[in-house]
Image: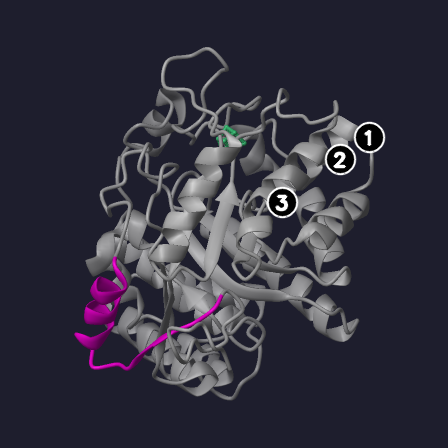
């Protein structure tokens, strides 16, 4: 039976989960008045689920290398080892960047890199990644390290012929705080064959994230939207994330998904085949906003924190997303390479004041948070 949009929105407002078919119906709407009702519903749910306050984090990105064995078709960041523009930070550079972040009151280092088969210590990939953690945590034990995508976990396990669980346990023991849920792209193997054919498949991404939750490592979750995926595939992606979170809750895992982030595709400098197929360079804001609202309606009972990407949408676009179901504006980042090299125009760095001002312009209160959404109460780093 086909259900009408008002019925779907009422169901969501009654705190019931909507079905994949109902989510798809919402994504297929084109009439401005209907889309406006979807936005209003997402905004009401956001208020009920997390309140008025918009959070942000003082963090720094460190992308330790862009040398990568893979060739994702949306990636303008990767380089071969001796290619012009390739780089690989040494231990001192990583420590200096962390020290600079700490001087700027960062509570989090977000660290990811290309998959570099040469990155080994004692002939082992895992030992290289452990040394990355030690380099940061030995000097700055209080900083939260949010690092290594499920793709990086699989890379380490494959290089060293060990299990995902062994990798995650070792990284956690060394001081890993949480993992970014990147490399999810769209959790559909037909799409992955086109946009990232060498990456882990959808089932492996889900397996690694579930393993992290089981072992007590929180993750985020993402969706790379606005390229060749269909609304049906977007909803199936959200359904997989919702099921993953439900599994964590139902099995009483010690960790879970802390937030959901939509990453709209930026094609300007992307490899030409995908760029030509998508047919545009910058995201379509209206599409990203409708998806943002539907994601809040679809996931909000299970994943409360929703964040737009100011790097991809610009700060004005991210501010709009705060009225379409988002409650967090993300981090200061301090430096951003991956999306900026793809041609994003949102910038590479925000000061806390810029983020605060953006939030205040919507007449919403702001609050600095930690990676795991605790309040930072004082600049001494006291959290609640
Ligand atoms: S997206 Fe990541 S894995 Fe894919 S080519 Fe770029 S750096 Fe490598």
| Coloring basis for residues | one colour
- Pick the front one: 227 or 103: 103
Question: Residue 330, labelled with which disc?
Answer: none
Tag 3 residue: 134
Quadrant of the rendering where the N terminus is positioned: bottom right
Query: Which of the two labelled residues, at mark 1 and mark 3, occupies the earlier sequence position?
Result: 3
Q: Which region of the structure is painted magenta? A: 351-370
Residue 144 position, x and y percent, is 54, 59
Residue at screen point 41% across, 61% down: 27
Going 50% across and 53% down the picture, which residue do you hit? 222
Q: Which residue is mark 2?
A: 157
* Residue closer to the observer: 90 or 297: 90
- Residue 164: image location, x then y, percent: 77, 43
Q: Secondary structure at mark 3?
A: helix
Label 1 to label 3: alpha-carbon separation? 22 Å
Most extreme residue toward the front is 139
Horizontally, residue 361 falls left or right of residue 9, namely left
Q: Is residue 39 magenta?
A: no
Circle 1 or circle 3, nearest the eye:
3
Instruction: Determine which residue is flagged by label 1.
Output: 161
Q: Residue at x 39, y 78 (%)?
A: 378
């Amino acid at each position: 039976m086909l259900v009408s949009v008002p019925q779907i929105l009422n169901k969501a407002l009654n705190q019931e989960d909507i079905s994949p078919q109902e989510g798809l119906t919402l994504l297929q709407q084109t009439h401005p008045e209907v889309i406006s009702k979807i936005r209003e519903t997402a905004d009401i749910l956001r208020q009920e689920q997390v309140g008025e306050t918009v959070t942000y984090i003082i963090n720094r990105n460190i992308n330790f290398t862009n040398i990568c064995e893979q060739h994702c078709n949306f990636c303008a960041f990767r380089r071969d080892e001796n290619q012009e523009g390739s780089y690989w930070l040494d231990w001192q550079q990583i420590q200096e960047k962390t020290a600079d972040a700490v001087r700027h009151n960062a509570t989090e280092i977000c660290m990811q890199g290309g998959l570099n088969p040469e990155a080994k210590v004692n002939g082992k990939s895992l030992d290289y990644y452990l040394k990355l953690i030690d380099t940061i945590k030995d000097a700055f034990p209080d900083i939260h390290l949010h690092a290594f995508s499920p793709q990086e976990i699989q890379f380490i396990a494959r290089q060293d012929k060990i299990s995902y669980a062994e990798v995650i346990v070792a990284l956690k023991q060394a001081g890993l705080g949480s993992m970014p849920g990147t490399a999810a792209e769209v959790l559909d193997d037909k799409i992955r064959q086109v946009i990232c054919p060498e990456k882990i498949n959808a089932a492996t991404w889900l397996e690694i994230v579930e393993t992290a939750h089981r072992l007590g490592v929180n993750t985020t979750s993402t969706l790379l939207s606005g390229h060749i995926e269909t609304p049906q595939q977007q909803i199936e992606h959200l359904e997989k994330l919702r099921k993953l979170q439900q599994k964590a809750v139902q099995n009483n895992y010690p960790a879970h998904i802390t937030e959901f982030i939509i990453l709209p595709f930026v094609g300007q400098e992307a490899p030409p085949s995908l760029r030509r197929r998508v047919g545009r360079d910058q995201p379509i804001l209206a599409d990203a906003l409708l998806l943002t609202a539907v994601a809040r309606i679809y996931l909000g009972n299970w994943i409360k924190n929703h964040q737009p990407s100011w790097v991809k949408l610009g700060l004005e676009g991210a501010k709009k997303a705060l009225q379409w179901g988002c409650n967090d504006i993300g981090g200061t980042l301090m430096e951003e390479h991956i999306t900026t090299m793809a041609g994003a125009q949102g910038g590479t760095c925000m000061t806390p004041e810029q983020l605060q001002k953006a939030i205040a312009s919507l007449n919403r209160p702001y609050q600095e948070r930690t990676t795991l959404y605790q309040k930072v109460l004082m600049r001494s780093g006291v959290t609640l």
